[in-house]
Amino acid sequence: MKLTFSIFLSFIFLSCNPSNKTPLVVYSPHGKDMLQEFAKRFEKTHPDVDVQWLDMGSQDAYDRIRTEKENPQADVWWGAPSTMFIRAAKESLLAAYKPTWADDVAPENKSAHDFWYGTFATPEVIAFNSRLLSAAQAPKDWDDLLDPRWKGKIILRYPLASGTLRIIFSSIIARSVKAYGTGKEGFEWLQRLDANTEAYTPDPTQMYLRLAREEAEVTLWDMPDIVFQAEINHYPFGYNFPKSGTVSLTDGIAIVRGCKHEKLAEEFYEFVTSKESLILQARKFYRIPARGDIPRDSLPSWITSTHFTSMPIDWSLISQHESEWMEKWDAEVKGKGNR
Amino acid sequence: MNSEKRLAPASVVLLFLVIFFAAGYILFPLVRLLKQSVQPAGVIFSFHAYMDVLRSTFVEAAFNSVAISLLSVLGSALIGSFLAYVFHSFDFPLKTISSKLVLVPLALPPLVGVISFMFLIGESGILTRGIATLLSIAPSHFALEGWWGIVAVHVYSFNVYFYVFVSSALSQLSESHGSAIDASLSLGASRASTIRRIVLPMLTPSFIGASLVTFMASMASFSAPFLFGGTTRYLTLEIYTAKLNGNDANAAAFAVLLSIVSVSFLLLLRWYQGRKSYVLVSKGSGRRSTVPHSPVVRLFAVAAAMVLVILLSLPVIIIVVLSFVKEGSWTYQILPHSFTVQNFVKLFGDPRVFKPIANSVEMALTATVIVVFIGVCASFLVVRKKFIGKRFLELMMNVPFGIPGTVIAVGLILSFNHPSFFSAQSILIGTFWILPLAYAVRNLPILFRSTSSGLEGLDPGVEEAAWILGSSGWQTLRRITFPLLLSSLVSGALLVFINSLGEFVSSILLYSYDTKPISVEILSQLRLYNVGGAAAYCTLLMILVMVAVGISSKISRVTLAE
Amino acid sequence: MAELSLRSISKSFGQLQAIAPLDLEIHSGDFFSLLGPSGCGKTTLLRIIAGLEQPSGGSLFLNQEDITKLLPQKRNIGLVFQNYALFPHMTVFQNVAYGLEVLRQSKNEIRKKVESVLEKVRLNGKRDVRVPNLSGGEQQRVALARALVVEPRVLLFDEPLSNLDHALRLETRGVIKQLQKEAGITSIYVTHDQGEALAISDRIAVMDRGIILQTGTPEELYFSPANRFVASFVGRANFFTAEICKGGFAINFVGEEELLVVLPEEIYIERKVKGETKSTLGSDLVSTNACGRIIDVQFSGAIVEYLIEFLDQKIRATRSSGTHKAELCAGAEVMISLPHNISRKVSRE
C-alpha cells in the first residue's frame, strides 16, 4: 500500500518536466534519423527552442491534425504527398505561408494560395528482387504488370493507407478518364492487377521483408526508398522506370492552421527547406529536391544520373476524386480479381 | 447485512468518484462519438452515415467479425482450457517454468508479434519453409492469411484468458468441491462423464467470463485483421478505412454499430449466466481432489501440452533471435546465419533510448494505479452494495473492452481537446495524462472483472467475523478483505500493467514528444525498416514484462506471509 | 456476566416476514439455545443480536443498555460461525490474536492471552499453522478460541458443530459447555438438532416460521410441550385422538380441539399371542385393546426404535436395547399399551 502510494507520488514529480524552452511540434514521416539531425541543427541556432518531432506516417499525421482541429497540437507538418495537402487545405487545416524560395518551385508543385510548397520529388518505380530477376526480365512498363507471368508474384502496400499507392492507382484511373472520358477502363486495369497481386501489406516494412524474403518478386514503390534499402540495408532490390512515363509525386511542407508558435514554425519551415538543407537531405537521406535551382554538381550521382519521362497528370482531378475512387476500389475491386 | 441497506458516507464518496470516471471518460467520449455519427459537418441530424454504412460493407464486415470472433473464442477455449486442465491435474518435469511460458503471449505487443509470426509461419517463415522443404511442395500452401490467419493470431493471444480463468476456477473447485468429484466417481460414473457432468458445469461461470473477454477482445482487435486479414473485411478495419478516406461520420457510425454488437453479446452472456449460475457455497474445509487418469492419457496430454507451450513461446524466441540477426541478411534462407550485437549497440548509442521505456513504465504504472483505484471501488460497490443504476454502472465498467482502441482514443480527443468539466477545465490532449487515461479506460474491465469475481468468491462471514471482533470497517478492509483479494487484484493489475506497457493503437493517436511510448518507438524503428532495432527494443520490452511478473508474484507472496 | 433482552424484535426481508415481533429474556450466565428447523429465523435472530442485521422493529437491551443501533464492532459479542469464517491468510495464532490487536492491547498481553486460550482448546501445538491446513475439528476450535479470547459479554454460536462427524461433535459439545461454564459467559446457541439442544442448554426457545413457540428448560419442553410442533420437534412425540381413562382407552374421547401427547419411550408394545386379548400388564399400564403392525425396527445402540402402523397413523415407540426381543421384528403384530396417568394434551393446530 505504502509502496504503491510512494510510486504514485514519484510520478507526479517525474511528470512535471521543468523546461522553460519553447516547444515547437513537428509532425513528419521523414524518419527518426533525419528528424533528429535537423532538430539538433535548428536548436543550435535557436537555443531557447525545443523541437519536438513526432515521427509518423503522413496518413497518421493528417489524421491527427484533422482530429485535433479544434485545438491544434502541431506547428509544422513536414512531409505528405501534395494530394493530401490539397485535401487538408480544403478542410481548412493549413495556414498560408509564402516561403522566400516560392518562385523557384514549378506551379504544379505548390499551392496557389500558399498553403503548402513542394520540397521533394519522388518518382514511382517498378521495383523487383534483384536476386530473382534482372532489370531486363522485370516488368518495364505499367501494362507489363498485367501479364499472367506475374500472377502471385506482385506484392503491394495496402493502397488506402499508402499515399504512394493511392497516387499510382488514382493516376491509372485519371489516365483512363482522360483517354475514354470514364474511369471504367482504369478500374478494369486495377482489377487485372489485383488478380496478379499476391498480397497487400499493411506497412512498408512488411513489403520490403516479403520482397526480400522472396515471397514475391515485384512491387510498386518510390525510387528514393528503394535506393536507400539497397544501399544502406543491402537488400537485393532493383528498379525500372515505367517506359511510358511514371508518376512523380511531390512531397511538401505546410504550417498547421491555428498553431501555437506560428513565427517559430515559419523559421523552422525556412530552415529545413534552405538550399544547404536540401543538399544534405539529398546526400544523407536520399531525398530528391523538388526545386529546380539546386546546383546539379552538389547532388549525388544517383539523382543526377536518373532520367525518366513523367506521366502527364491532372492533379486537381485526382485530389477531387481520390477518396471516392479509393472507396470504390476498396469495395468493388480489392480481392475480386478472382485470385 | 446492514451495509446493503444504506450507503455509508464513505461509500457515497467512492460511488461519486466511480460515476465521475465512468461518465467522464467512458460514457462522455462515446456520446461524443455517437454525436459525430449522426451529426456530420454542418448537418443538425441525419442517419445518412448509418444508411450508407449499412448499404455498403457493414453486413459482410459484421458477419466476418462475429464469425471470426466466435471461432477465436472456440479455439482459445479449447487450447486455454486444455492447458489449464493439464497443468492442474498432472505433475511433470519443468511444470513450473512451462506454466509461466503459457503466459508469454501477453508479453508480446501485437505489432512485433506480427513480424515474428511472419518469420515463423508466413509464406517465408521458418516453419513454412522447413515443412515445404521436407515435403518438397510450394510454401504458399501453408501461409496463414485471411480468416484462419486472424483466428490463429487471436487464439495465440487470447487463449491466455481461458488459461487464467479456468486455472483459478479449477483450483477453487478442487479445494472446495473435491467431494463432488469423489462422490461422482464413487457412484460409478466414468472419468469422462465425471468431467462432462460434474467438472464442466462447475466451470461454467469461468468459461462464460473468459468467452466474454475473448469475444470482446476479438471484436475490438485491430492489429490481427489489419496485418493478417489480407482482403478480409473486418469491422475495426472498416472504421480505419472510413477514417483514412476522411469520412468521419461513417467511421463513427461503424464504431457505434460495432459497440452495439459487442454490448449485445455482453448482455446476452450476462443473461445466460444469470439463468445458469452455480452457487459454489463452501461450508467447512475440503481437500484437494482431481479426476484420476490412466498413465497413457496422462502421457499424451502432457506431451500435447508441451508441444503447445513450445509453439506459444516460439514467436518470442524468434524476436530474441531477430534482435541478434544482422540487418538485411536473413532473406531466402530457412534459418538466419549471420549474428551480431550491432542492433543493441546502436540502440544504446542513442542517448534517448531509455526515454520511451521510462515513459511507458511511468504511464503504465499511472494507468494501473487509476485502474486499481476505480476498479476496486466499482467492483466493491457493484458486488456488495445496492443502489439505483447498479446494472448500468456494471455495464459501463465492461463496455470499454468491446470498443477498439482507436475509437476510444478518438472519443477522448473529441472530448478533451477543449476545456471540459471532467478535466477540471483544462485541455488534456497533448499532456501526459491523456495516455494513462486511455490505457486506464481500455483496461478497466480486466481489473473490474478479476476483482469482482474475487469479491464474489470471498465469504462475507470472514469480514463479519472481523467486525464482531471489534475491527473497524477500515481495519477490516486493510487487514482482512484486501489481503484476501490481493491475489486476484495483483493478477488483474499485472494484466493491466502489461497491456498498457505495450499498448499501441490508441497511443499512436495520443502521444506527444515527451510521452512517446515503447510501442510507438518500435514503430519508428520499423518505419526506418530497422527490423533488428525493433526486435532489440522488443526484447527490452519483454524483459520489462518478466520483471513486472516477478515483482507482482513477490508482492502477493510477501503480503500473504507478513 | 450479562443479561440480554429482546423487546418486540421483528425482521422482514421485503414482503417476507422472517421474524414476527417477539420478546425474549436471556439470563446472565445462561446457556440458551434457539432450536428450530432450517429457515425458521433462528440464524437471522442471532445475526440481529450480533448486529450483523438491523431489526425491522423492536429493541435489544444488553444489561439494560439499548444496543439496537450499536455497530457490531462496539457490542463486544462473540460469534462462532457455522463455516467458522476463519481468516484463511493467517496462522492459528494470528487468527486468535486479531481481536486483541484491533483492541490495541500490548504484544505481551496478546501473546499471554492467546497462548492461554489455545491451551484451553488444546491447540497450542498448532499455533503457527495456517488455518487451511487444519482439520475440521481443529478449525472449529480455532473459531471458538478466537471468539473467547476477547472475553465477550455474550457468546453466540451458529450451528458450530454441523460440519463435524458424530464423535467429534459430542466431544466438542463437551468442550464448549465446559469452557462456557468456566468463563460464565452468557451464550446463545443456534441449532436444529434437538438432542444437542437438550443436552447442552440451560434453557431453550423453540422457533418455527419466525415465531418463538415455547421457551423453557429442556425438561419443560420435553415433558410439557406447549403445542403440537414443540412436542413433535423436541420429544418426537406421538399424538392420539383418544384419552386414557380408568380401565380403558377411549377413542375420540379427547375434545375435538385437543390431542393426547405420548412420548415414544412411554409406549409399551408386546407380541400379540393368538387368541389372547388380555395382556400381562403391570398395574400402571392400560391396554389400548388395539393392534399395530411393526413397519421398521431401528437399532441405535442403547435404544431400539420401532415404527408402528396403528389406527391409521404411524407411531414411534422406543425401548432400551436390553429389553428388545427378536420377535419384535418388522411385520410383527403387536399390542400397544400406554401408561394410565398420561394427561399431556396439546391443541390440534
Image (tube, coloured by chain):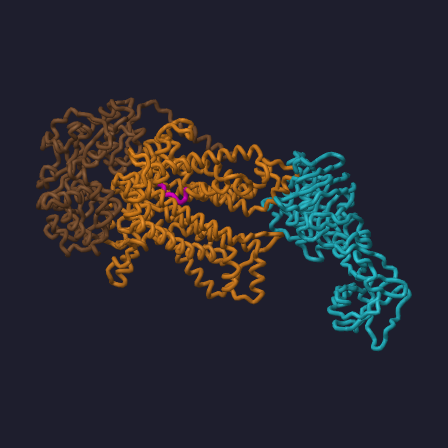
Residue B145: percent from the left, percent from the top? 29, 54
- Give the position of the C terminus of chain C as an image quadrant: bottom right
As displayed, is residue B430 above or below residue C161?
Answer: above
The residue most toward the bottom is C275
Q: Quadrant of residue B245?
A: top left
Which residue is located at x 57 percent, y 61 percent? B182
Residue C175: percent from the left, percent from the top? 74, 50
Report the chain shown in cyan.
Answer: C
Q: Which one is in front, C92 or A274?
A: A274
Residue B110: percent from the left, percent from the top? 34, 46
Q: Which residues make up the magenta segment?
A: B400-405
Report the chain shown in orange.
Answer: B
Res. C282 visible in picture: yes
Magenta span contains residue C81: no
Q: Quadrant of residue C315?
A: bottom right
Report the chain shown in brown.
Answer: A
Q: Which one is in front, A109 or B356?
A: A109
